[in-house]
Amino acid sequence: MDFDFAFFMQAVWAAVRAVPHALVMVVLSLLLSVALGTPVALARFYHVRFFASFFQAFHTVLRGIPYLIFLLVFYLYFAQFPHVDIMYVAVLAIGLNYSVQVAEAIRGALESIGREQFDAAYSVGHTGGGVFLRIVLPQLIPALLPPLSNIFIWTLKALPAASLIGVNDILRAALSEATINYRYLEAYLAAGLLFWVIFIVAEKIFLFIEKNMLSKTTKAVG
């Protein structure tokens, strides 16, 4: 089968128009992941008796169930509520799924700071809020950026599955152009190309932010 370059560019343009919607979904999913993952990480880091055990079980369940199952179960459940936007169903499934990775990233970043720094800060009279703002946060953000950049990419790569429930993401937008002439090869390649470009741009942005954060931290320590 010959490759139709003109249609390939048409599919690329259709996918490009879906990028803002896709990025909104990624950002909302990440925010939900952080909101769900932060209390899990804190409970496990501080060994809160009941919540640490509960979140450990919650963590195990989420890691053991594929994201696609969450997506389809949520879709079938929320289908009984016609006013619910399916975009938010996909955001809920993605955010819940990757909250496990966010929790592990936050807990790992907290562990890298070292508990002795917390003890030293408390010993000189700092309150809990002061310790977090002056000692934990300046070290936590640079340590979190590399894993969060990976989670951003994973979240972006999870979006095509949302097209199964009718969410207008990048892949669905590209494939919609192929419903007339059945040139799905060009449509898939167009979507793949666009995902790759977004990945490259996101990687550059995260590296730039990480370098700036590290340089500011180094100057502050110096």
Image (cartoon, helix red, strand yellow):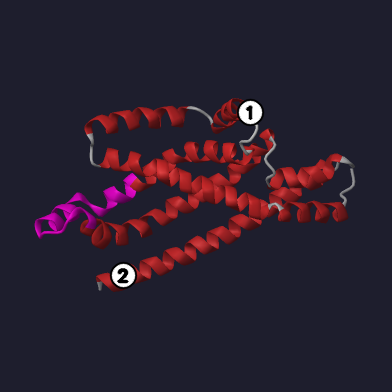
**Front-most of 151 and 52?**
52
**Front-most of 84 and 157?**
84
Picture disc at residue 79: 1
Contact, mark 1 vs mark 2 (Cβ under 8 Å): no
The residue pinned by badge 2 equals: 218
Say whether residue 103 is left or right of residue 96.
left
Q: Residue 40 placed where, x, y %?
A: 34, 39
Part of the protein shown in magenta: 107-129
Q: Residue at x 87, y 56 (%)?
A: 6
Element type at mark 1: loop
What residue type is disc 2 on? Thr
Residues packed near mark 2 inside 10 Å, few (<14), some (14 to 19) or many (20 plus): few
Q: Is residue 125 magenta?
A: yes
**Front-most of 15 and 83?**
83
Q: Residue at x 63, y 50 (%)?
A: 22
Q: Residue at x 64, y 51 (%)?
A: 21
What residue type is disc 1 on? Ala
Q: Is residue 39 above or below residue 80?
A: below
